[in-house]
């Protein structure tokens, strides 16, 4: 009985025992951090092994039909299209559909060797990472165990839906819990203190909490004096964020505000959700929330993502030590500039359904403006639009190394099933393409993929050989008192930001008035995945009863319009529209055609969770 880690883009990274008793079963380990249970998505991949949506052989789409092809023909056609194009007009789109080091990271080496364009990998967590680093020099924080030992504040995160083990630890710890969000999520309804904020105003609430802690003299003077820079400037700056200002701007009543401050005086762990980076003022909110813990003298008190804490050299895996892309495009604007490219190669992602204006990628492919090639295990919207479709194995069908951005366990996944038909893994595909493109001898492609992994994980203190033998290795926690900033301290007033021409203090710009479309998580789906198992949910939104204009509504803005079902609900404040579906409207068109792609100022994450729309009946 071996071990296996779920590779999904998810906080929990569940670890399973693999049981074979006539069929493959995944049994969640009873130990920490999986605690003996998993979500509906964690169990679904076994069912996907025989999905009717599986891609089993290369496919070529012509003007009138889709035909099966050999790998030689499919790769030959793709190589010819790439050769014909200027490298700057070739772009690869990939993300975290599978978190394996070989599946996601290594294939980028081919495109860096060719000098093609790349995205900036900003769609999810980049804004918060870069914003928090301006003050701390790093973005990692609390270890998982802390969620069971201290009060917990879930800020912009429906943890009971999308961070189930962190939620379980917090509830089992029997300490006070709070949540801050823009709608009444399952988590908001289950915590001791729910705090409802207006979209785009989290930064106001966080700076208000910081001001109140300072005003009460409740901050850790010793830590502030020894380990921080610019406190006096920060103290002066936050004076305007009074309880009255917080109530006026963020909509948080004073009694709720003071209760939140009281929880912070008990030194909680704050779990800062990735969602916050996708909102108006989101990066600034992440900055401000993290600085509350600097006031408390608690450098390990917030958790955003720990992926940077383990010492894995992701840049080495991508080959950035040797070659870099010729152009980097923010993920939020790829759809809007797709006409600037001639070849688009996709793996580990479904950009047609998940990127803002991703529908334009499919339309450009249909017109023949681009050659769209996709390497994927199952047919999705991007594969259905592609000219060249290459079959890939699921994570259960290949060896890989899996890390978590929450817990500190590194896992060696050994394949437990054979891939169907002629499916080939990502490293094989890029090696074959490299030969056809004449770069097979490039240093980045000459290095064996497993050797690259071995080098990339050396910073964790573990070798690939040791990891293969043990399967599961617990990594050491980082040193929280090292601050790689410009001053070597936690920077309340960010000298690091100032050197880069960025605001040295968290900023607040009042959001636009009108309707705000946002996207709460779903218990059955990870982004656009698992619809082949659980079906297509109804494309519906929740609106406040005061905003209800009918069962069918059109949401529209300057980017286009979509049609969805509408349900009145007091769980949604006035002016907020909460989308419940997974990617499509009533006509089957991507909901993201109207999503906001404007990049944030720090990490470039699009502000799609604060998408401004207008509404009318169908």
Image (spheres, rainbow, N blue to C red):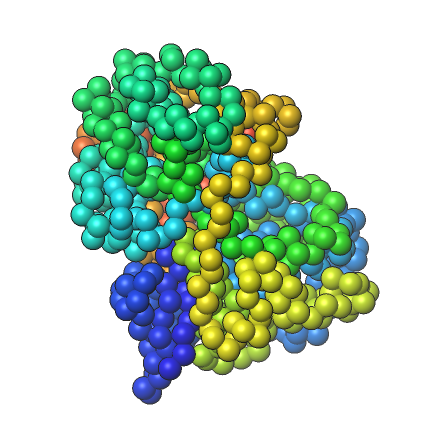
The mark tally for this picture is: 0
Residue 228 percent coordinates (x, y):
49, 28
Name the residue furthest bottom.
22
Q: Is residue 568 left or right of residue 483?
A: left
Q: Look at the image and tell me in which quarter the C terminus lies.
A: top left
Q: Nearer the viewer, residue 172 or 61?
A: 172
User: Foreground residue, 262 or 62?
Assistant: 262
Left or right: 447 in relation to 183: right
Figure check: 613 above or below 321: above
Q: Residue at x 75, y 54 (%)?
A: 322
Instruction: Tell me where residue 281 appears, x and y as whole percent.
Output: 45, 27
**What residue lies at 33% left-to-right and 41% top-to-bottom?**
269
Residue 565 is at least partly visible in this image: no
**Residue visible at 51% across and 35% down in the picture:** 136
Q: Position of residue 162 (x, y in %)?
A: 33, 50
Left or right of 570 on screen, residue 46:
right
Judge whether 50 appears above or below 281 on screen: below
Decide: is 143 above or below 299.
Answer: below
**What residue is shown at x 55% (from left), y 29% (from top)?**
601
Expressed as whole percent of the image width and height from the top left, the position of residue 407 reads 40, 56
Q: Is residue 235 visible?
A: yes
Image quarter of the N terminus: bottom left
Closer to us: 120 or 577: 120
């Amino acid at each position: 009985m071996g071990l296996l880690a779920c590779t999904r883009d998810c906080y929990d990274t569940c670890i399973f025992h693999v049981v074979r008793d006539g069929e493959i079963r995944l049994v969640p380990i009873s130990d920490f951090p999986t605690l003996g249970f998993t979500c509906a998505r964690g169990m679904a991949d076994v069912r996907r092994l025989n999905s009717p949506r599986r891609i089993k052989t290369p496919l070529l789409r012509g003007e009138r039909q889709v035909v099966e092809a050999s790998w030689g023909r499919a790769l030959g056609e793709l190589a010819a299209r790439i050769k014909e194009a200027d490298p700057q007009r070739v772009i690869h789109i990939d993300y975290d559909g599978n978190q394996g080091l070989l599946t996601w990271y290594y294939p980028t080496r081919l495109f860096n060797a060719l000098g093609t364009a790349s995205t900036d990998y900003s769609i999810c967590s980049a804004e918060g990472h870069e914003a928090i680093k301006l003050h701390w020099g790093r973005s990692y924080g609390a270890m998982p165990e802390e969620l069971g030992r201290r009060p917990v504040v879930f800020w912009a995160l429906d943890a009971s839906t999308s961070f189930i083990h962190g939620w379980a630890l917090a509830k089992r710890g029997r300490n006070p819990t709070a949540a801050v969000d823009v709608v009444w999520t399952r988590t908001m309804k289950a915590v001791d203190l729910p705090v409802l904020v207006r979209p785009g105003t989290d930064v106001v609430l966080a700076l208000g909490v910081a001001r109140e802690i300072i005003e009460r003299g409740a901050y850790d003077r010793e830590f502030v004096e020894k380990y921080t820079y610019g406190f006096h400037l920060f103290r002066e700056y936050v004076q305007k964020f009074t309880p009255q200002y917080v109530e006026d701007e963020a909509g948080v009543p004073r009694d709720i505000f003071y209760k939140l401050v009281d929880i912070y005086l008990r030194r909680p762990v704050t779990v800062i959700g990735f969602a916050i980076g996708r909102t108006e003022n989101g990066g600034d909110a992440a900055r401000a929330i993290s600085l509350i813990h600097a006031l408390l003298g608690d450098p390990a008190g917030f958790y955003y993502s720990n992926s940077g804490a383990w010492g894995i050299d992701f840049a080495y895996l991508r080959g950035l030590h040797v070659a870099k892309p010729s152009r980097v495009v923010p993920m939020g604007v790829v759809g809007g500039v797709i006409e600037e490219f001639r070849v688009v190669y996709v793996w580990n992602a479904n950009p047609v359904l998940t990127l803002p204006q991703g529908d334009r990628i499919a339309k450009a492919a249909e017109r023949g403006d681009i050659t769209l090639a996709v390497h994927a295990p199952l047919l999705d919207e991007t594969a259905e639009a592609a000219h060249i479709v290459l079959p890939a194995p699921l994570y259960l069908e290949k060896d890989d190394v899996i890390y978590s951005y929450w817990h500190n366990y590194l896992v060696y996944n050994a394949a437990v099933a054979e891939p169907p038909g002629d499916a080939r893994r990502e490293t094989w595909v890029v090696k074959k393409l490299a030969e056809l493109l004449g770069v097979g001898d490039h240093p980045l492609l000459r290095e064996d993929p497993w050797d690259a992994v071995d080098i990339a994980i050396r910073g964790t203190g573990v070798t690939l050989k040791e990891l293969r033998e043990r399967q599961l290795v617990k990594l050491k926690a980082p040193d929280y008192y090292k601050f790689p900033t410009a001053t070597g301290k936690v920077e309340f007033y960010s000298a690091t930001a100032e050197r880069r021409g960025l605001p040295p203090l968290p900023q607040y710009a009042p959001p636009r008035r009108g309707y705000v479309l946002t996207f709460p998580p779903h218990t059955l789906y990870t982004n656009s995945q698992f619809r082949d198992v659980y079906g297509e949910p109804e494309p519906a939104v929740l609106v406040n009863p005061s905003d209800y204009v009918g069962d069918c509504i059109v949401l529209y803005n300057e980017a286009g319009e979509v049609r969805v079902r509408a349900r009145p609900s007091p769980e949604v404040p006035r002016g907020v529209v909460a989308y419940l579906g997974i990617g499509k409207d009533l006509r089957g068109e991507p909901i993201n055609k109207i999503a906001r792609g404007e990049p944030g100022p720090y990490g470039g994450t699009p502000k799609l969770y604060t998408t401004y729309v207008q509404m009318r009946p169908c």
